[in-house]
């Protein structure tokens, strides 16, 4: 496969992911995971061990705020980002006291060192296509 073909395939995967996460049914599905947000048992163990001291957290792929709320409730200053405008709009509606932005995990709009911690939960990393040479 040529470089152009790999780049086109990667771009197609990103566009497909963006399209799926804009669908109302997908937003509703993510929103149903917890009324006040929740961490899975594994996520809670990671946060408890590695995010022990309150700090500034970037919650990548925040969806509708499932992980953002419990991070804030643990005393962190959290910014939730997601590539889906619809997910971010729902997160803002559900958690108006928290900060959410539309942003791309592969091209973040933050300066280096802006955060003490970064959480990319659930299967978010599986939705990121690698850069091709």
Image: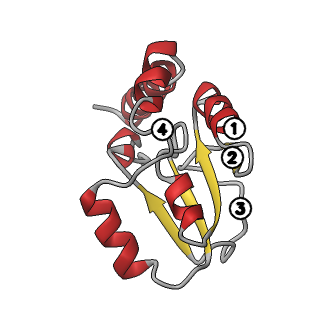
Report whether 52 appears left or right of 2.
Answer: right
Q: Secondary structure at mark 1?
A: helix
Q: Which residue does the image show at 47% across and 21% down from the upper left? A: 28
Pointers 2 and 1 in contact (C-beta within 8 Å): yes
Q: Which mark is residue 81?
A: none
Local packing at callout 4 (Cα closer than 10 Å; few below 14, some 14-19, many 20+) is: few
Of callouts 2 and 4, the N-terminal one: 4
Image mark for residue 92: 1
- Outermost residue, bottom direction? 53
Kindly identify the residue that appears in the image at 39 percent across and 45 percent down: 124
Task: Find numbered disc 3 in the image and state the secondary structure of the residue it sits on.
Answer: loop
Tell me which numbered mark, 2 or 1, is placed earlier along the sequence: 1
Q: Earlier in the sequence, mark 3 or mark 4?
A: 4
User: Residue lying farthest top?
Assistant: 24
The span from disc 1 to disc 3 (Cα, nearest Å) is 20 Å
User: Which residue is labeled 2 in the image?
Assistant: 100
The location of residue 59, given as percent across then percent down, is: 54, 56
Q: Would you say 119 lies left or right of 80 here?
A: left
Looking at this view, is 2 or 73 the one in front? 73
Give the image location of residue 106, x and y in percent.
54, 49
Say which residue appears at 46% left-offset and 77% top-offset: 51
| Image mark for residue 35 | 4
- Dot 1, crowdedness within 10 Å: few (<14), some or many (≥20)? some
Instruction: Select label 2 or label 4 by which is in front.
Output: 4
Q: Write down the residue under mark 3.
A: 110
Q: Check contact, mark 3 vs mark 4: CB within 8 A.
A: no
């Amino acid at each position: 496969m040529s470089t152009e073909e790999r780049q086109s395939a990667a771009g197609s995967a990103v566009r497909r992911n963006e399209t799926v996460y804009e669908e109302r049914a997908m937003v509703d599905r993510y929103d149903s995971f917890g009324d006040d947000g929740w961490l899975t048992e594994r996520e809670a163990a990671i946060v408890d061990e590695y995010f022990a001291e309150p700090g500034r957290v970037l919650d990548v792929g925040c969806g509708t705020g499932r992980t953002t709320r419990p991070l804030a409730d643990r005393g962190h200053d959290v910014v939730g980002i997601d590539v889906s405008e619809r997910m971010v709009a729902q997160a803002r509606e559900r958690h108006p006291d928290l900060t959410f932005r539309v942003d791309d995990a592969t091209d973040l709009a933050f300066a280096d060192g802006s955060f003490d911690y970064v959480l990319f939960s659930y299967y978010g990393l599986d939705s990121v296509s690698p850069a091709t040479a």
